[in-house]
Image (cartoon, grey):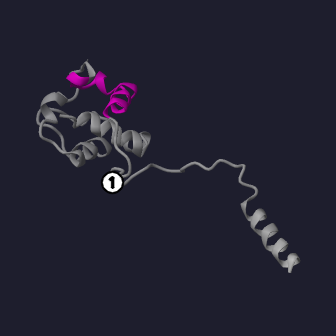
Amino acid sequence: MRGPLLIVLFALLLAGCGGEKTVSPTGPVVGPLPTAGKADPAAGKKVYNDNGCGACHTYGPAGSSGTVGPDLDKFLKGKDATFVKTSIVDPSAFIEKGYTNAMPAGYGSQIDSGSMADLVAFLTQK
């Protein structure tokens, strides 16, 4: 009886071995904003600043005063998280009157989903 049990335990042990390799996502993160956990607007401010958003946009909470893109203090007033995320990942979805689409289209694949949720939380904070 002890032999078969040892064989099963050995097989289970082998099944879990060999996991030294780290696996990473291989493509852009797409889809809805994460619902588990809570987005962090303070972390979103860092995402905003680290990705150079303030070079083009004015946004009071970030202390930015760029003028190439729309003034986010005005443009985002009353907009929900879905609109804000869409505007980042698909900048051609809506172009504010008087502006051309100069925003790079690659932000959706450059910012991971957690950071995107934080950025959106920062941009939609009341």
In percent of width and height, residue 28 lies at 45, 49
In percent of width and height, residue 82 lies at 24, 49
Q: In which quarter of the image is the C terminus?
A: top left
Please say if 71 is above or below 78: above
Please identify the quarter of the rendering in which residue 59 is found: top left
In percent of width and height, residue 97 lies at 11, 36
Please identify the quarter of the rendering in which residue 64 is found: top left
In percent of width and height, residue 29 lies at 43, 50
| In-front residue for pair 35/24 | 35
Magenta stretch in the rendered image: 41-61
Q: Residue at x 36, y 41 (%)?
A: 116
Please identify the quarter of the rendering in which residue 89 is found: top left
Q: Residue at x 84, y 71 (%)?
A: 6
Label 1 Cα crowd, 10 Å radius (few <14 / some 14-19 / many 20+): few
Is residue 31 in view?
Answer: yes
Type of amino acid at the residue the image marks with label 1: Pro
| In-front residue for pair 91/58 | 58
- Residue that lies at the very extreme toward the bottom in this rendered image: 1
Q: Is residue 77 found inside the magenta-colored segment of the image?
A: no
**In this image, 111 relative to 69: left or right?**
right
Q: Quadrant of the N terminus?
A: bottom right
Is residue 105 in view?
Answer: no
- Residue occupied by mark 1: 32
Q: Which residue is drawn at 26% across and 47% down?
A: 86
